Image (spheres, rainbow, N blue to C red):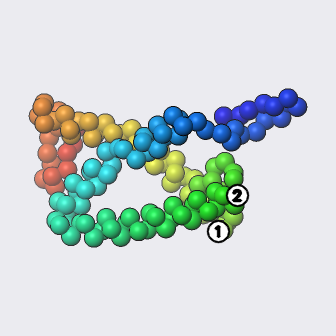
Amino acid sequence: MANTDTQGSTSLRRDVGLIPLLFTSVGSIIGSGWLFGALFATIEAGPAAVFSWIIAGVAIIILALVHAELGGMFPLSGATARYPHFSHGSLVSFAAGWITWLGAVTIAPIEVLAVLTYASTYAPWLITQTVSGAPSGS
């Protein structure tokens, strides 16, 4: 959100309240992707899927710490695409921006599939099961 000061220049707001920060954090953490990830990993790998979650957790922590350090060093908007530009150039930055955009636009269909899957317990006509066990809309 752009902010206009008394001289008329625009800049990004650098403050966030407790409630918006809480809702942003909870909204980013709680979703259906982690439930589907656990479901499909267990279907494919069984109990050994726990090891992949541990490895992924370590990788995510490392990436989060690097991103937090870069955020402190370079407080810029669009960091997901700008940090790769600083380190790897325009092509990697372009790819990172598009991957982030694709991730953002696929959230809605994933959530719809999750709601249909969860609701199919009470209304089984909402989805049909395919041979692989993955739900699909009917």
Q: Horizontally, is 108 left or right of 69 in the view?
A: left
Q: What x and y, as percent, mark residue 54?
A: 33, 68
- Nearer-N-terminus badge (2/1): 2
Q: CA distance from mark 2 to mark 1?
A: 16 Å
Foreground of the two, 71 or 111 = 71
Residue 127: mark in rendering: none
Please name the residue that numbered disc 2 is placed on: 74
Q: Quadrant of residue 10?
A: top right
Please name the residue that numbered disc 1 is placed on: 88
Residue positioned 64% across, 57% down in the render: 71
In the figure, 17 relative to 101: above or below? above
Locate the N terminus by quadrant: top right
Q: Horizontally, is 89 left or right of 108 in the view?
A: right
Helix, strand or loop under label 2: loop
Are there few (<14), some (14-19), or many (20+) residues within 10 Å of tag 2? few
Residue 125 visible in image: no
Helix, strand or loop under label 1: helix
Amino acid type assigned to the residue bearing label 2 in the image: Phe
Q: Horizontally, is 94 left or right of 44 in the view?
A: right
Locate the C terminus by quadrant: top left
Q: What x and y, as percent, mark residue 20?
A: 53, 35
In the figure, 34 relative to 21: above or below? below
Q: What x and y, as percent, mark residue 68?
A: 58, 59
Q: Quadrant of residue 41?
A: bottom left
Are there few (<14), some (14-19), or many (20+) residues within 10 Å of tag 1? few
In the figure, 32 relative to 66: above or below? above
